Amino acid sequence: MLELELTRDLYDNKCTLGVLLGPEGRVCNILEPPWKDNRSNISCIPPGRYIVEYLPRSASGKYKDCYHITGVPGRIGILIHKGNFYTHTLGCLLPGLRVGWMKGIRAVFASAGAMRKLHKVTNRQRFILHVRDNTGRTN
């Protein structure tokens, strides 16, 4: 089964940033909420290995063409979906081709392009996501 690695390299009180790597190298950047003890809707997920399933549509119907990260301890409904700012996520992972700032808020840009690249790498099939934390933060 395909394995992708998310290496987190920046953490602050607003967000967590990392790079998603595949067999051919860098896929995209990932923006998540900050670490808040793995609490639902406000925290990034803990480091670990997770099975990720492609979803044509999320259970709520809000997101299309996304991914569901399964097996997160104490959490459900964690997705990889389009978005730009930490305010666009309730614990989900947001892909982007570039990282920057907009109106004083850290953001990922070209999220739709990053999702297309992720779809190309995964062929919309199940994969393993290995989340590694290189921020120096301890859970």
Image (spheres, rainbow, N blue to C red):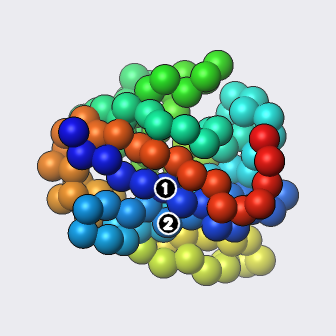
What residue is drawn where x is 77% and y is 60%? Answer: 136
| Kind of element beneath mark 2 | strand
Whether residue 87 appears in this view of the structure is no
Q: Secondary structure at mark 1?
A: strand
* Direction from residue 87 to residue 83 in the image, left or right: left
128 sits to left or right of 71: left
Residue 6 x, y percent position in the rendering: 49, 55
Q: On the image, numbered disc 2 is attached to which residue?
A: 19
Residue 137: % across, % down: 79, 54
Check the picture and name the quadrant holding the N terminus: top left
Residue located at (54% from left, 69% from top): 108
The residue sitting at 22% across, 50% down in the picture is 122
Q: Quadrant of residue 53?
A: top left
How far from the left and from the top, in percent, is residue 120? 18, 59
Q: Amino acid at mark 2?
A: Val
Residue 114 picture quarter: bottom left
Q: Amino acid at mark 1?
A: Leu
For disc 1, the marked residue is 6
